[in-house]
Amino acid sequence: MNHSDWSKKDLEYIWHPCSQMKDYETLPPIVVDHGKGVNLYDVDGKRYLDVVSSWWCNLLGHSHPKINRAIKEQLDSLEHVIFANFSHRPAITLCEELMKKIPRGLCKFNFSDNGSASIESAMKMSFQYHYQTGNRQKVRFMSLSDAYHGETLGALSAGGLDLYSELYKPLLLDIVRIPAPDCYRCPKGNKRGCCQAECIDAAQEAFARHGDECAALLVEPLLQGSAGMRMYPPAYLAKLRSLCDAYNVHLIADEIATGFGRTGSMFACDQAGVSPDIMCVSKGLTGGYMPMSITITTQKIYDAFYADYREGKAFMHSHTYSGNPLGCSTALAVLKVLDEEHIIPRAQEKAPLFRQMIVEALGDHPHVGEIRSLGLVNAIELVENRETKKSFPSEQRLGYRIYREALKQGLLLRPLGDVLYFNPPLVISPEEMEEAVSICASCIRKVLG
Ligand SMILES: *Cc1c(COP(=O)(O)O)cnc(C)c1O
């Protein structure tokens, strides 16, 4: 069977995520045979440069020999075990290793199997903490506009993107929404990077009005990924931390997309010198190999659940695959590679070069509104009018048209609306960067003229 046979058979059975399946009539699924480094190869051998890290999770390239080996070794001793009252060395060692890297104060690890689940766990944990410490009025949550925290109902509630949540509003929690910073179209008229995060005033107002009834604020630190790779300064995050302290509101840092070096530091919170009360990690945690997530919290929160059984204070939350040993061994291997191969400092050395390539190729294009960068994440926002920053009408599906053109040319881009972005495995080489940027620029020119 060739690629087109496989592709047809796929559509007989599979309902793909986040897709209008009718689009697949003209853009059939790409059936991947194998991956190596930054490259994917379909069943006919066509190559694609995976500069989106397969939905932002692949950290060290596909089919990394050291990670492959770790999984194979683990498989021969233990694939899975119930995690209530049972444990295993990979989970314990992983926590021990993570302790060396996570923001100070975090020290208790609650395992789940995907990002959304770790957010649900964080929300329930925060609510229950306040309930058990005499603050039963704290029954709501705060989050930023255009936030993304996953797609199960609690996480979807916390998110602020209508594209995903509008239809489900009748099912969702009533969230206190804080207008997020928008540095490209700054409401205060500041230029990116030249401010004291004055837009914190919106958050101050929200806390003054609703802080007392809120258990936690959820936030994607520094980078609102799904919003279109929107980036905001560390000072804003630090100010959110102070507000949370002032109102006894937990800061839940959703580091699912930003963790493990994506933004240039181990965690995005590090750049603001901020320790959250609860931190959610997934995606890069296993280098994009295994579905695993962890909700990490403080001794203080943990202690509020610690009591005699009859007091009913336990956190009665579980997932079948909590603490899966294959996932834990994978994560351990990822941490080892990060250290041994100095992955994050090396990625930081490459970062200015990558940005420079993009600016040289596209900086003068009349429809490139902004090129923004954080770590190896680089976003290119396309606009109809550069002066007014007016977007293209969404019916034009410009990003989607560029996506299709890029696939033809062997580049996996997957834009967010009209924001094209690169969020590649941290091991991408300068040659691969050059190739990706040049294909991207050629696709933009082809579609936009
Ligand atoms: C991907 C993502 C999630 C959800 O993780 P899933 O594993 O897809 O459920 C939550 N928050 C952020 C910031 C993410 O990028």
Image (cartoon, rainbow, N blue to C red):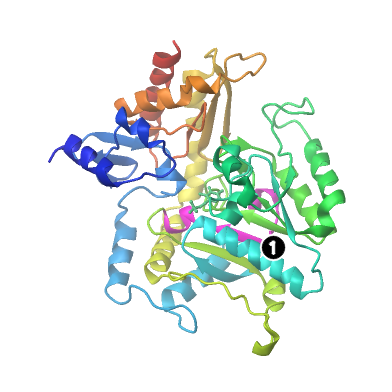
Q: Image quarter for residue 231? A: top right
Q: Does residue 350 appear in this view?
A: yes
Of residues 388 and 372, the one drawn nearer to the viewer in this rendering: 388
The residue range painted magenta reads: 269-287
Q: Which residue is mark 1?
A: 277
Residue at the outermost top position = 449
> How many dots with numbers?
1
Considering only vertical position in the picture, is 434 above or below 270? above
Q: Is residue 406 left or right of residue 84?
A: left
Q: Is residue 360 left or right of residue 310?
A: left
Of residues 213 and 370, the one drawn nearer to the viewer in this rendering: 213
Residue at the outermost right position = 208
Residue at the outermost left position = 1
State which quarter of the image contains the N terminus.
top left
Going by the numbered disc 1, the residue's amino acid type is: Asp
Position in image of residue 311 (x %, y %) = 70, 86
Q: Write the residue at 54% across / 50% down.
A: 150
Q: Is residue 327 magenta?
A: no
Q: Does residue 220 appear in this view?
A: no
Considering only vertical position in the picture, is 360 above or below 121? above
Position in image of residue 270 (x %, y %) = 64, 52
State which quarter of the image contains the C terminus.
top left
